[in-house]
Amino acid sequence: MRRPLVAANWKMYKTPQQAASFVESFVPMVGSATAEVVLFPPAVDLAITLQTLSAKIGGAKIGGDAKIGVGAQNMHYAEEGAYTGDISASMVTGIGARYILIGHSERRQYAFETDEIVNKKLLTALKHGLTPVVCVGEHLAQRNEGQTESVLHEQVFEALKGIGAEQAAPIVIAYEPIWAIGTGKTATPEMAGDAHRFIRGEVAELLGSPVAEKMRILYGGSVKPENAKELMQQEEIDGALVGGASLDPASFCKIVEAAG
């Protein structure tokens, strides 16, 4: 059984004070949750998010062994250097974060990140012991033109290039159809399940069936409390990467509970 993972991507929202307030409210709500939970705050909020979690629940534990983790939304693939505005993997781990979001569609669109850059970041993340959540997904025009599988094939193949089966255990993939992000549109559970099934097949081709069967694949794209349960009932969907609905603690808690 793959343990569900539900991640909150706060994007460019929340001041440090608002991040702390979220944690204060959220932790008591999810005492019975069994899913793994990860918060991805903006870089300036990482320290206060980690500090508030530690103070609130000591060791960031909820519901027995169901931990709340914290990750960064982005990092550079270089170890260090003259990259103004970027942060490195050692900075992420040094502050206490253990997860990293890689290749989000907004990074690909606005920061012009290529599949090659995604691959470089993934290799660096694994080297530093981070749990990477690697995002893949197609545009609406690509889906309408029947290109979804070819797009996913290329993105998965390029992201995992140079990675062996023995390295792949920490990797999480998030399928986020770009046409469903922030639009209110959501892939039907069947559409999402089909895409997840295809991605798992691609991983099996590259890294073998045992790795593919264990790898968690999340759905992202206008996930809300109203549709979370139906999405999570799909056998191939192992959790969610949540944007707007993760900004409110009560809303996000309902999605976590829907995952298990």
Image (cartoon, grey):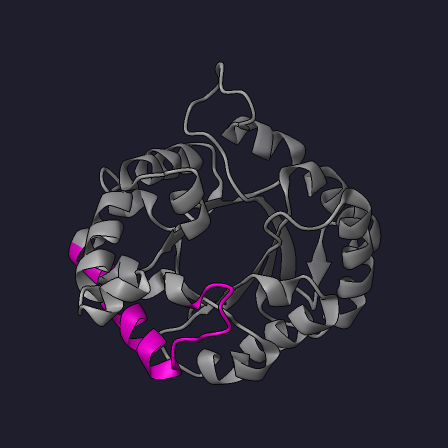
Query: Which quarter of the figure has residue 42?
Result: top right
Percent x, y for residue 226?
A: 58, 83
* Residue name at image x 67 percent, y 50 percent: 13
Q: Nearer the viewer, residue 10 or 259?
A: 10
Apparent side of residue 120 relative to residue 41 in the rendered image (left or right): left
Apparent side of residue 19 relative to residue 4 in the rendered image (left or right): right
Quarter of the figure that contains the N terminus = bottom left
Residue 128, placed above or below residue 132:
above
Residue 260 makes an appearance in the image = no
User: Going by the picture, which residue comes out furthest to the top?
Assistant: 82
Q: Main secondary structure of the magenta part?
A: helix
Number of numbered discs visible in the structure rendering = 0
Q: Nearer the viewer, residue 142 or 207?
A: 142
Residue 199, placed above or below residue 80:
below
* Residue name at image x 60 percent, y 74 percent: 255
Residue 125, placed above or below residue 58:
above
* Residue name at image x 16 percent, y 57 percent: 205
Quarter of the figure that contains the C terminus = bottom right
Q: Is residue 188 magenta?
A: yes
- Magenta stretch, residue numbers: 180-205
Apparent side of residue 108 relative to residue 239 in the rendered image (left or right): left
Residue 244, placed above or below residue 170:
below
Query: Which quarter of the figure has residue 73?
Result: top right
Residue 74 makes an appearance in the image = yes
Q: Is residue 106 magenta?
A: no
Percent x, y for residue 181?
A: 46, 63
Query: Which quarter of the figure has residue 9?
Result: bottom right
Percent x, y for residue 176?
A: 40, 62
Percent x, y for residue 192?
A: 35, 74
